[in-house]
Amino acid sequence: MTMQNKIKLAVFDIDGTLFRSALIIQLIDHLVLNGIFPKEAKDEMEEDYLLWLNRQDSYDRYIKKVIEVHNKYIINCAEKDVIAVAEKVVDWQRDRVYTFTRDRVKEWKDEGYFLIAISGSPDYIVSKFTNCFGFNISYGSICEVVNGFFTGKINADSAARKDEILRYFLRNSSVEVDLGESYGVGDTEGDISFLSMVGKPIAFNPNRSLVKHAENNGWQIIIERKDVIYQLS
């Protein structure tokens, strides 16, 4: 296959990169509001949230706690009830996105790039959110459902490192991919693994670990603050 026939990818992290929050955080808030999760679910996240908010601990610790709480309280919840809430969250939050990444999604899709989303949030909300923006495929954590109810078990492959998920896509793709001309966009050190696989990585609103890695490797660094977008040299 010639280079002209190879497809180019645009691979996005979602939480904090396209979406200006984390889908799983908004999801838990609304599962509590709708009485599907108990109030204790939010209470269990409060300490880690405040530590992050006050810059006394990392966002990574906080989001790990959020995922832990989701997986704990999703057990025995009816799939139809949870999906209904997820759809409402996406309807309410779909425009809460960053200008830079929103515009890149549209631009690269118009240019024929194959859009891939890789997120740590549950697949059942990631897929609905990314569908709003025309992504070709999305990957999120797959939560097991048996007889219409969540079991709390998470598919191990779906929770793998993001580079492993991208490699899974490449192995199962029916066409050849030009990784050298492909883009990747992420915001934390958890995205370094897949950003390292593409020829055009972008560290967007990166945390300290990703900034350091991006600087050492000559990656593009983009910051969006309020209504200003600028590139660090």
Image: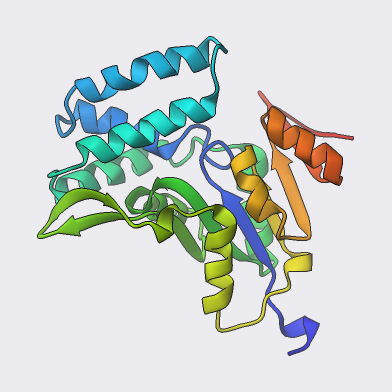
Q: Would residue 156 be found to the left or right of residue 216 on screen?
A: left
**Which residue corresponds to the image point at 17% horizontal and 43% vertical from the top-left?**
75
Q: Would residue 180 be found to the left or right of residue 79 on screen?
A: right
Relative to residue 94, is residue 165 depicted above or below? below
Q: Would residue 232 be found to the left or right of residue 145 on screen?
A: right
Give whichever of 32, 225 is nearer the camera.
32
Quadrant location of the N terminus in the rendered image: bottom right
Q: Is residue 212 visible?
A: yes
- Colour mapping: rainbow
Percent coordinates x, y for residue 179 in the rendering = 73, 68
Relative to residue 204, is residue 158 depicted above or below? below
Q: Residue furthest right?
A: 233
Percent coordinates x, y for residue 65 in the rendering = 38, 29
Q: Is residue 104 visible?
A: no
**Which residue corresponds to the image point at 64% horizontal and 55% vertical from the top-left?**
194
Q: Residue furthest bottom?
A: 1
Q: Residue furthest left?
A: 147
Percent coordinates x, y for residue 167 in the rendering = 58, 67
Quadrant location of the C terminus in the rendered image: top right
Percent coordinates x, y for residue 180 in the rendering = 78, 66
**Which residue corresponds to the image point at 52% horizontal and 30% vertical from the top-left?**
60
Relative to residue 109, is residue 18 depicted above or below? above
